[in-house]
């Protein structure tokens, strides 16, 4: 559903007011929105890894089903354990994310001061500081 002209105008006014009132927040939120489209951003699922993990999990399910159909109990148990391990490994592989080079290091640097957080962390730490100032004031 498209926005009406009035709704577009109100939305633009709200955006302009936000940019005027808090330019740091506006720039942080706009850069976060632009960067969220990139598939290589840290913390996001890798499509290749997701596909490989899915294939591994389905192959593990096939091994478990093969273990159920085997007549000998020793082979059935062995195939069941191997298939289950393949399924768990496939799910872990599919859901694994890379921290990437932009990871925030929480440990203090050699100079004794921690590295400044970027992106969402900076936004949240700023909000926490503002909240504490309001509570103290």
Image: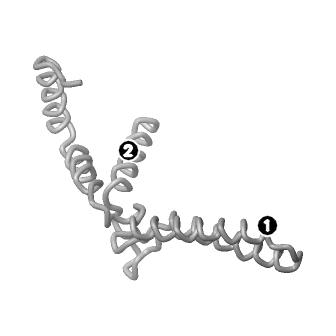
Quarter-of-image position of residue 105: bottom left
Res. 101 mark: none
Image quarter (top left, top right, bottom left or bottom right) of the N terminus: top left
Foreground: 110 or 65? 65
Residue 2 position in % (x across, y down): 19, 25
Front label number (1 vs 2): 1
- Residue designated by label 2: 127
Quarter-of-image position of residue 98: bottom left
Foreground: 15 or 136? 15
Foreground: 72 or 116? 72
Q: Which residue is the extreme one toward the right?
A: 73
- Residue designated by label 1: 68
Q: In this picture, is 109 found above or below 106?
A: below
Tell whether 6 sits left or right of 42. left
Colour scheme used in the picture?
one colour
Crowd rating for badge 1 (residues with CA inside 10 Å; few <14, some 14–19, many 20+): some
Name the residue located 13 percent from the left edge and 33 percent from the top edge: 16
Local SS, label 1: helix
Foreground: 24 or 102? 102
Name the residue located 39 percent from the left edge and 64 percent from the top edge: 47
């Amino acid at each position: 559903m498209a926005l009406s002209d009035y709704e577009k105008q109100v939305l633009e006014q709200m955006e302009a007011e936000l940019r005027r009132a808090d330019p740091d927040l506006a720039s942080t939120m706009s850069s976060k929105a632009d960067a969220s489209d990139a598939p290589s951003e840290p913390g996001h699922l890798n499509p290749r890894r997701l596909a490989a993990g899915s294939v591994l999990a389905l192959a593990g399910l096939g091994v478990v089903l093969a273990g159920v159909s085997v007549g000998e109990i020793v082979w059935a148990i062995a195939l069941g354990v191997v298939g289950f391990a393949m399924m768990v490994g496939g799910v872990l592989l599919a859901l694994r994310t890379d921290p990437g080079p932009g990871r925030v290091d929480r440990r203090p640097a050699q100079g004794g001061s921690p590295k400044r957080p970027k992106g969402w962390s900076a936004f949240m730490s700023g909000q926490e500081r503002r909240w504490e100032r309001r509570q103290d004031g």
